[in-house]
Amino acid sequence: MARNTPKNGANIGFEEKLWLAADKLRNNMDAAEYKHVVLGLLFLKYISDAFEERHAELLTKVDEGYDPEDPEEYQADNIFWVPREARWTSLQAQAKQPTIGKLIDDAMIAIEKHNPKLKGVLPKDFNRVGLDKQRLGELIDLVGTIGMGDPASRNQDILGRVYEYFLGKFALAEGKNAGQFYTPRSIVKVLVAMLAPYHGRVFDPCCGSGGMFVQSEKFVTEHQGRLGDIAIYGQESNFTTWRLAQMNLAIRGIDANLGSENADSFHRDLHPSLKADYVLANPPFNDSDWGGDRLREDVRWKYGVPPVGNANFAWVQLFIHHLAPTGTAGFVLANGSLSSNQSGEGNIRKNIVEADLVDCIVSMPGQLFYNTQIPVSLWFLARDKRNHRLRDRRGETLFIDARKLGHMEDRTHRDLSVEDIAQIADTYHTWRGDPNAGIYADIPGFCKVVPTAEIAQHGYILTPGRYVGAEDVEEDGEPFEEKMARLTSELAEQLAKSRHLEEEIRRRLGGVGLDF
């Protein structure tokens, strides 16, 4: 998470301090349950701040005929209308009242009523018996401290960053269940940096809380593009996660079509005719309960019928099915998919390789995910490896072994630096012939371009380590004979010390009557 800058008026470590304070108020509540309380309040604070900013502006224009209490004055600027009783100032003034839970529920209901796009999205169980109302009031006061500073900070800058930071912290707290809603930012950033979705249709059929879309929008703005140049489509099967995604996108003003409700992409595709320019996804790994027995004749299985016991290659073929003629896909899969030959998976992979769809495979470092230790790779597929401004790469696949990159954030979790992400993405863009990325060259132990014929010789296995070879070791200039003599002498010295220590241990144990 990027640190705050003077622009937003917050101190260094603002998100961390806020999380520690909010987590302290959690008491004994399960993280999965508490998540919706905190994120719901953050969303409420966001839309209220945006509303109040516009309301204050309209108050200065009353003489010009503007009405601060006319919902259309807000909807025209893509700002949610917030009824008087649902505004943050009103709720925070009553935060210490025992009825605060019901007041928040009523506020959420009123907001959904006046904003059809939010229908069925907002959490409305703040009045439940198990939620301590005193702590809820304290949490409201805490959230009320967010958004100080200039108007731009009050809206998307601080609140959006806090929302994203809290999603990650809840993922860490929930452990193995976090994969339902959260993909680590470093994974998402690599996918987005490599696909570079400047314009066109972006699709994620298992979108979780919407992290792929958020990073895509950030990529566009950071590269001086226009947000309106990309159209976002998504789908999510889990209802509570679908709600998180809707709020996550709304808090940043991102307009997206996630369907009118949650739905399973395999069994009820909400975007059946969509042909996307970019597919970005992190599907569930090795899902054995995907209902494949009911889809044996599905039109999407162009490269082979996926096994009922594992959905990995069902997802791959769903992504391909939704790609436009020049579209590209980037997604995460468990490493087993690179080499598995069980239940016909090897034949499906072979057919996809022979169709010249596999553009690049990246082996990722371990411990990037909060919820699984399964090693993963990133797959990049391209419908057409020709491009009028990039190099023709038909009949080739780029392999990148990035397993040595990254650093440990804590005892169990690894992260990628900005430089790590750039190294991976720049290698890919250089290989594709991007004129701004330099000249590509194989790097032993890291990357190599492999023709399809060579992949075939290896049984269509796509494990990068099989192709990139060993890293070049820099010579130290010491002659071999001298090095061996030195190392042998050092080993003899160490063995002598070992024998001495062993005798000393025996002597001391013997002194207390313990012989062995």
Image (cartoon, rainbow, N blue to C red):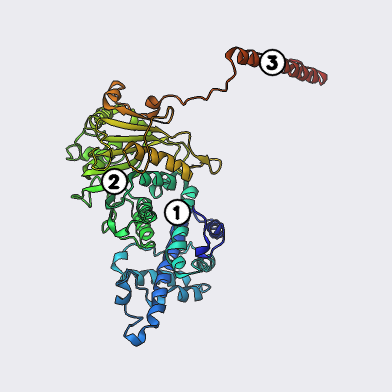
Taking 179 as reference, is 502 left or right? right
Element type where label 2 sits in the image: strand
Q: Of 98 and 281, which appears nearest the observer?
A: 281
Mark sitting earlier along the chain (1/3): 1
Element type where label 1 sits in the image: helix
**Residue at screen point 35% across, 81% down:** 69
Q: Measure how far apart labels 1 and 3 are at the Cα level.
A: 53 Å
Mark sitting earlier along the chain (2/1): 1
Residue on which the image places disc 1: 167
Element type where label 3 sits in the image: helix
Which residue type carries mark 2?
Val
Q: Of 367 and 380, which appears nearest the observer?
A: 380
In the figure, residue 449 lies in which quadrant? top left
Residue 124, given in percent of the width and then of the height, sits at 39, 65
Indicate which disc residue 186 carries: none
**Residue at screen point 38% across, 61% down:** 252
Q: Of 209 and 436, which appears nearest the observer?
A: 436
Indicate which disc residue 495 carries: 3
Which quarter of the rendered picture does the C terminus lie within? top right
Position above or below: 258 against 413? below
Regarding residue 127, the answer to whether it shows in the image is no
**CB within 8 Å, label 3 to label 2:** no
Taking 334 as reference, is 327 left or right? left
Crowd band around label 3 with a 10 angstrom C-alpha radius: few (<14), some (14–19), many (20+): few
Residue 38, given in percent of the width and then of the height, sits at 47, 61
Residue on which the image places disc 2: 279
In the figure, residue 396 lies in which quadrant? top left
Residue 67, given in percent of the width and then of the height, sits at 33, 83
